[in-house]
Image (cartoon, rainbow, N blue to C red):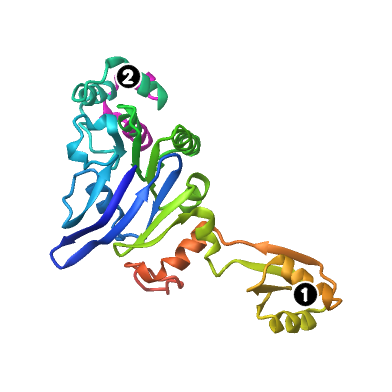
Amino acid sequence: MIEVAELTKRYGSTVAVDGLSFHVRPGVVTGFLGPNGAGKSTTMRMILGLDRPTSGTATINGRPYIQHRQPLHAVGALLEANAVHTGRSAYNHLLALAQTNGISRSRVSEVLEQVGLASVAKRRIGAFSLGMGQRLGVAAALLGDPAVLMFDEPVNGLDPEGIVWIRTMLKSLAAEGRTVFVSSHLMSEMALTAEHLIVIGKGKLIADTSVDDFIQRSVQNHVRVRTPDAYRLRLALADKGATVLDADDALSVTGLDCRQVGDIAGAAGIVLHELSPQQASLEEAFMELTKDSVEYHGETGPVLEGSAA
């Protein structure tokens, strides 16, 4: 388990992380989300003892990272896949890590096989592609067979097969009862991989909830209705407190669920041609709930001819 309590990090007058508290439980994949500059990387670095908190605590299985005598057995992490000696082979890179934590040579070969790098184990890392480097970083995280795993943008540089592979692996690790904590900007991937979310913005906690509950909080969830008697249905639904908007050839209804809309239409004798729930995507819910925490905004309109691109 990872436990963060009132964690704060200041750099001069800048507050990168602001009184952050959450638990990452074993047995589920927990996604760690937030806009750029939200404090995700700083938080993960403090959990791993790479940055010292200004105040507050971060523990792994009840102890700070630096108090674990053989840390690779307690937690495996992938934060910077390119933070390696590019002149070493993949095998020798992992072997050097293994020898600092009493891990056998056979385990090095085992994780190289697990991540699909056994055939290039003797190749220099400097000749690796971005995706191969990511796989090597995953191998290093798995090396000590830890109960806690942390990954920052693990699918970066992976091809579609690699993305499916790591998604399946993360779920399998959580199913074994491990704590799996994953930071990513890819909302579509998080929707397929994570069960729980920790969402932060400007260093503060925005949400600590399941993926389903997070999406249900979105105001973009609505009921789509098509009927030849839209005027009467609109009046009937508004009378029950619903908000009704035009949506192409249909009505968009918020404030009532499908059953309630159907019951109201039936009681009024109104024929329906479509009645369907419309759920926001994780990306839409994320954009909505973090809009006040985005530090860097780009223009969304067209670039005018002659303007700087």
Residue at far left of view = 12
Q: Is residue 110 left or right of residue 96?
A: right
The dominant secondary structure in magenta is helix
Q: Residue 4 in the image: x percent, y percent?
A: 29, 51
Q: Residue at x 73, y 66 (%)?
A: 259
Label 1 sits on residue: 264
* Amino acid bearing label 2: Arg
Instruction: Give the mark nearer the N terminus: 2 vs 1.
Output: 2
Within 10 angstroms of label 2, few (less than 14), some, or many (20 or more) residues? some
Which SS class for mark 2?
helix
Q: Residue 108 in the image: x percent, y percent?
A: 31, 20
Q: Residue at x 44, y 70 (%)?
A: 300
Q: Is residue 247 left or right of residue 264?
A: left
- In the depicted view, which residue is nearer to us: 173 or 88? 173
Q: Is residue 207 above or below residue 233?
A: above
- In the depicted view, which residue is nearer to us: 104 or 20? 20
